[in-house]
Amino acid sequence: MAESAVLDLPESIAQPAVRARKPINPWIIALTVTLATFMELLDTSIANVSLPYIAGGLGRSFDEVTWILTTYLVANAVVLPMSAWLSRVFGRKNYYMDCVALFTITSFCCGIAPSLGILLISRVLQGIGGGGLAPVEQAILVDTFPPAKRASAFALYTVAIVTAPAIGPVLGGWITDNYNWRWVFLINIPIGALSLFLTNRFVKDPPAFEAERKSARTAGGLKIDSLGILLVGIGSATLELVLDRGQIDDWFGSPVICWMLGISVAAWAGAVYWELHHPDPIIELRLLANRNFAIAAAFYFIFGVGLFATTTMIPQVLQSLYGYRAIDAGLVLGPGAFVITLLAPVGAQLIQRGLVHPKVLLLFSLVVVFLSMMDYSHFTLQTDYNHYALARALQGLGYAFFFVPISVIAYSQLRPDQNNRASSLTNLARNWGGSFGIAFVTAASERRQDLHQARTGDTLSASSGALQQSIRATTSYLQAHGYSAADALQAATLRYYNLLEQQTRLLGFMDCFRVIGWLTLAMVPVVFFIRSFKVGGKAPAGH
């Protein structure tokens, strides 16, 4: 009778062990977390072309509204290195959702801001929310996919971090021209809401992370690295201010920049010493003792330099020298993003199937990126859209096979409990590379232009007879078409001065492309110092 009663029970009660929760497809998780990261990275560049419209709408000067970019980047730089520690304190899923929620709410505040002051405060909070998204996403991807299939997840991450900054200016220009600058921020709201819903439904903290989180706590509670937080925060904020405002404020000609740089160096020197001796540091610098991870971090930096410097420089070249609109200049970046989107998954499959080792793919990538930079460096003022687009596509071919192998190498010898901390360092290196790259091209291009202008001026002085003859011929032509003698001479002289300025400005940009190219090629010998590892294998004991 009792047996019969048991048999009559519903199957879900009689056999509870049989009804296990169906595992979530890892690609659903990957797409979920990539959505918010794409949104955040898009916001780093989407507002750039809207600054004149924002200045006009709020009744402020252009120089004042440039702080919209600076405040966001500074707040982002402060939070990014702390993201691993914060996710351990609050729980990774909770922290990620908090970041998405803060980013979404402050995007709304930016969109309705009635004054520049409220807009800047909103941008600071938006940067705080956005700073934790990319590193936490990378950590989630590493823990969601087994080592043998991580390359595919890294390919998706590559598409997000490359495509978002590239389409930002194009999308921002289109929105501003056709609607209103406020929609540059308001478009984040539906994306953020969707990301929150999907994250809550599909993302879970893995057991390895829960174990790491428990290890961060002691019987007396969590040991908060207060001094580390202070030093890293000050060091990151002041360094980002130096890099973002240096060219605007004349670098070392500005006492403020000099003080900021001194404070940054002192804060980071103190932070490195303190973090290496703290039992539970906010940044785990000891991970850099792992050779493969340290080499990968260096490559992340180079990746940031090359990608963000050229993404900033190419639109500048096209707008200032060729007369392109912001949207048209941005479209030149499209072929590169398309090639990366198309080929990054191919590189991932080559690695996962054991057809090509990550080191071989990385060497190929470095050489191709170098060739693309040399291609850029030979352009002239007669170079058309097709040549720039093809050069960008060649650069995209190189970067399509750059980030995936580097990411595989970075985590090749790390334990699962180290993944979360590692993601903060790799994203910090990439972020710093981008900031240094942008600062380099904005400063170096102007200084090289001055140098070329001085050299060209000396050359023209030596052949001033030919120059004067050209000016006289142009003056005569203008006089024949109704100009007075004085106006014709002034217009002719100005024409040749503008030609000189255009040529020397282009030469300054071309020099920057060469430097980035040679810097990339210089990393080739470093590849041979990477320790051998089996793709998809476990980290050796003791690492």
Image (tube, helix red, strand yellow):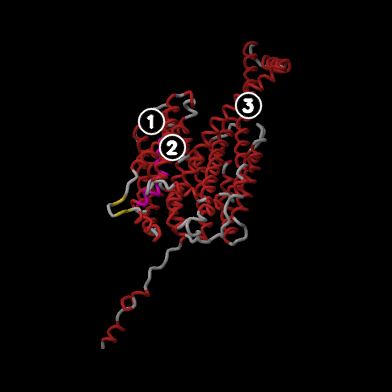
Separation of disc 1 and disc 2 at Cα? 41 Å
User: Please, what is the three-letter code of the amino acid marked with disc 3?
Assistant: Thr
Q: Nearer the viewer, residue 398 or 351?
A: 351
Eye-nearest disc, 2 or 3: 2
Q: Which residue is mark 3?
A: 504
**Tag 3, which secondary structure?**
helix
Q: Mark 3 or mark 1, which has the lower sequence index?
A: 1
- Contact, mark 3 vs mark 1 (Cβ under 8 Å): no
User: Please, what is the three-letter code of the amino acid marked with disc 1?
Assistant: Leu
Horizontal relation, residue 258 to residue 122: left or right: right
**Which mark, residue 269?**
2
Region in magenta: 68-88
Q: Which residue is mark 1?
A: 58
Q: Residues within 10 Å of mark 3 (few under 14, many from 20)?
A: many
Q: Is residue 268 above or below residue 157?
A: above
User: Please, what is the three-letter code of the amino acid marked with disc 2?
Assistant: Ala
Q: Is residue 100 above or below residue 462?
A: below
Q: Position of residue 364 (x, y in %)?
A: 64, 50
Separation of disc 3 and disc 1 at Cα? 36 Å
Q: Position of residue 497 (x, y in %)?
A: 63, 20
Q: Nearer the viewer, residue 327 or 412?
A: 412
Residue that appears at 54% across and 33% down: 440
507 drawn magenta: no
**Tag 2, which secondary structure?**
helix
User: Where on the picture, by quarter, is residue 61?
Assistant: top left
Q: Is residue 165 above or below residue 53?
A: below
Magenta-highlighted stretch: main secondary structure? helix
Q: Mark 2 or mark 3, which has the lower sequence index?
A: 2
Q: Position of residue 122 (x, y in %)?
A: 36, 38
Horizontal relation, residue 384 to residue 531: left or right: right
- Contact, mark 2 vs mark 3 (Cβ under 8 Å): no
Q: Mark 1 or mark 2, which has the lower sequence index?
A: 1
